[in-house]
Amino acid sequence: MLPSTLLLFLLFPFCRSVGTIGPNQYVKDGDTIVSKEIKFELGFFSPGNSSYRYVGIWYAKVPQKPVVWVANREKPITDSSGVLKINRNGSLVLFADNKENLVIWSTKISGKTNSSGTSVQLLDTGNLVLVQGENSDDVLWQSFDYPTDTMLPGMKLGLNREVQLNSFLTSWKSQDDPGTGDFSYRLNSTGSPEFFLYNGSTRYWRSGSWPWRNISVSTSHSNPFIFVNNQVETYIIDSAHNTSELSRYVVNYHGTLQRLTWNDIESQWKEIWAAPKYPCDQYGECGAFSTCSPDNIQGLKCTCLPGYEPRSFEDWYQGDGSDGCVSKQPQVSKCENGGFKVVQNVKLPDASISAWMDTKMSAAACKRACLRNCSCLAYSSLEIEGGSGCLAWYGELMDILLFAEEGSDFYVRVDSSELGTCFLF
Ligand SMILES: *[C@@H]1O[C@H](CO)[C@@H](O)[C@H](O)[C@H]1NC(C)=O
Ligand SMILES: *[C@@H]1O[C@H](CO)[C@@H](O)[C@H](O)[C@H]1NC(C)=O
Ligand SMILES: *[C@@H]1O[C@H](CO)[C@@H](O)[C@H](O)[C@H]1NC(C)=O
Ligand SMILES: *[C@@H]1O[C@H](CO)[C@@H](O)[C@H](O)[C@H]1NC(C)=O
Ligand SMILES: *[C@@H]1O[C@H](CO)[C@@H](O)[C@H](O)[C@H]1NC(C)=O
Ligand SMILES: *[C@@H]1O[C@H](CO)[C@@H](O)[C@H](O)[C@H]1NC(C)=O
Ligand SMILES: *[C@@H]1O[C@H](CO)[C@@H](O)[C@H](O)[C@H]1NC(C)=O
Ligand SMILES: *[C@@H]1O[C@H](CO)[C@@H](O)[C@H](O)[C@H]1NC(C)=O
């Protein structure tokens, strides 16, 4: 008898078995399977006050057992007749009422495999994998590719162009309903790739211009994302290498992206980072062509960029900067007789709107490229993996934050009348 089969027998009275679902095994409501080191558990659950049944994965050892992934989030089972098994085609399927043909949820791997020897394993990372054979690295499907509202260490969030997969987080509807809610955290790869928190289709918070820096600009809040961007993949991954620490990112149903870690001493989850949190965090708080300053103590957090003035002076001086700013001079005069003014320590504008990028260009060449084209409104030259790259904007400059320190240098095209001070470039 194999050790794993033995364990299965030993644990059977508790309806909790270790690790794997093979071709002739199934998990019914009430049973669970746990990962090898008992870090995560998979089974049926009812969230909050709901009586509906869902298949999910949760932390096995932590008191509140927070759910990190849900299979049938849109299609709850109304009673306890749910069964999870591997079907003849080698897919993991969920059905109820003994109606195996009425599939409620399944891993979609059609065409890729057949019945001969797929198995499902719950790993200690919290990843549920469907593999060819018992102990294979040949992963046909994994839950990490189809996240719910939670990002665990080791999970990639973003785009894989080779397999045409874009994975992103979406909030639950409420505490009682894991169905797809309004908020999502996802990559927009138009222009320079950036991650956005959306409320429906509206931008709600922006993580900062891509990968020029490993750490998101708001480093003071210890947000340990690592950005990776190459021809095949563009993703973020939680760099938390301390595997003894339990850590997760969640888009909650209030629309906040949180990083939570488990505190053993206080025996509770602690929020150690969250966004949006401060007034300037909200996307477009100060409108276009304007900066938002979280450190401004004088009440007016919005400031127009050099060469721009408030669109609506009245609202502006009453503290509502959401209309943004407009250029004082026509663009042509800036092109004929102008230059650039630097604004330091900024979170660069949204680069998915009319931005242009070159990952290998010197600062001088970047400036020349912007000067050459009269529609170019601003540029920034940035360090990227030892060299330098160029980012230039041709449309609305949105969502610029001004920090007390850190951040990037940002060059705004201005008329000659704006030049001639110590800011002269
Ligand atoms: C469940 O319902 C009770 C009573 O209506 C309420 O007090 C409690 O907050 C609810 N819990 C959840 C998790 O929704
Ligand atoms: C197996 O796959 C075939 C072809 O995609 C499909 O017609 C059939 O319904 C599947 N069988 C099950 C049990 O899902
Ligand atoms: C199923 O896969 C095995 C090996 O992976 C292969 O030998 C067998 O012919 C396949 N069966 C069918 C019906 O495609
Ligand atoms: C990315 O941003 C562009 C420009 O704002 C927008 O048109 C597009 O729909 C966005 N794509 C996604 C996938 O959200
Ligand atoms: C999300 O958008 C909806 C509809 O526009 C709005 O009513 C709601 O207040 C927004 N939520 C947040 C947290 O901004
Ligand atoms: C890893 O996390 C655990 C639990 O939070 C903590 O006790 C330990 O000091 C951490 N180790 C390192 C090297 O940061
Ligand atoms: C200026 O740049 C814009 C945006 O990249 C481009 O559409 C336009 O053709 C350029 N104009 C010239 C004269 O190069
Ligand atoms: C980010 O950090 C990782 C690991 O420290 C490194 O491999 C990668 O090259 C860095 N990326 C950039 C853009 O600097």
Image (cartoon, rainbow, N blue to C red):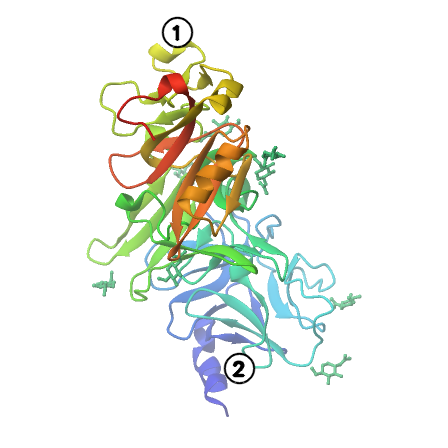
Along the viewing direction, whichever of 68 and 249 lies nearer the viewer: 249
**Residue drawn 32% across the image and 57% down it:** 63
In x, y percent, where is residue 373? 55, 32
Q: Which residue is mark 1?
A: 314
Along the viewing direction, whichever of 166 and 414 lies nearer the viewer: 414
Camera sees residue 170: no
Q: Amino acid at mark 1?
A: Glu
Q: Please say if 302 is above or below 260.
A: above
Camera sees residue 261: yes
Q: Please say if 83 is above or below 187.
A: below
Q: Circle 2 sits in a helix, a strand or a loop, which is it?
A: loop
Q: Circle 1 sits in a helix, a strand or a loop, which is it?
A: helix
- Which residue extends farthest top? 314
Q: Earlier in the sequence, mark 1 or mark 2?
A: 2
Q: Quadrant of the C terminus?
A: top left
Badge 2, how many Cα within 10 Å: few under 14, some, many 20+? few
Along the viewing direction, whichever of 21 and 353 lies nearer the viewer: 353
- Which residue extends farthest left? 265
**Residue drawn 68% across the image and 64% down it:** 98
Badge 1, how many Cα within 10 Å: few under 14, some, many 20+? few
Q: Residues under labels 1 and 2: Cα distance?
A: 68 Å
Q: Please say if 51 is above or below 143.
A: above
Q: Amino acid at mark 2?
A: Asn
Q: Which mark is residue 105?
A: none
403 relative position to 251: left or right: left
- Which residue extends farthest front? 337
Q: Which residue is mark 2?
A: 135
Along the viewing direction, whichever of 158 and 114 lies nearer the viewer: 158
Comparing labels 1 and 2, the label whose residue is closer to the camera: 1
